[in-house]
Amino acid sequence: MAKGWKERWREFKRGRPGHRFQDRYERKRSDGSSRSSFRRLLKPLAAGLLLVAGIVFCVIPGPGMPLLALGACLLADVSRPVAVRLDRMELLIRSLLSRFRRAWNAK
């Protein structure tokens, strides 16, 4: 039976930091063989449109960064190199946030 988006989000959150996107990519790759060609093309197309919209909205006022993040996450479902880079970015962001918290608490 297909999982709901809440269960998929919980599964994603339970994943190991630095491997979440790659693990999700592997799960999608093994589960997606029964999907139609249209559905397999729809996700990368939507990801590309969100990335383009995010870039445009970074230049003009609007929600540029959230659109970029959402587009990148969608693209990571169908592209292993994007999944690897997002996992690396997650570790980098976690490291920077940890340093910021330590510096903030030291004051």
Image (cartoon, grey):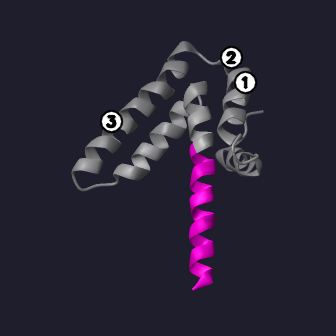
Q: Element under label 2?
A: helix
Residue at 69% x, 35% y is 24
Report which residue position mark 2 lands on.
34
Label located before the other in sequence (3 or 1): 1
Note whether 5 is above or below 38 in the view shown: below
Q: Is residue 104 magenta?
A: yes
Q: Which range is magenta?
A: 89-107
Discs 3/1, front = 3
Spot occupied by residue 93 in the image (x, y as percentages of width and height) = 57, 54
Discs 1/2, front = 1
Q: Quadrant of residue 49?
A: top left
Spot occupied by residue 2 in the image (x, y as percentages of width and height) = 73, 34
Left of 60 or right of it: where is 21?
right
Amino acid at pointer 2: Ser
Magenta: main secondary structure equals: helix
Residue at 28% x, 48% y is 57
Report which residue position mark 1 lands on.
31
Note whether 104 is above or below 3 in the view shown: below
User: Contact (CB < 8 A) between labels 1 and 2?
Assistant: yes
Instruction: Residue at the far left: name it.
Output: 60
Report which residue position mark 3 lands on.
52
| Image mark count | 3
Spot occupied by residue 89 in the image (x, y as percentages of width and height) = 56, 45
Which numbered circle lies on residue 10? Answer: none
Residue at 50% x, 28% y is 43
Label located before the other in sequence (2 or 3): 2
User: Distance between the Cα atoms at labels 2 and 3?
Assistant: 29 Å
User: Distance between the Cα atoms at labels 1 and 2?
Assistant: 7 Å
Q: Quadrant of the N terminus?
A: top right
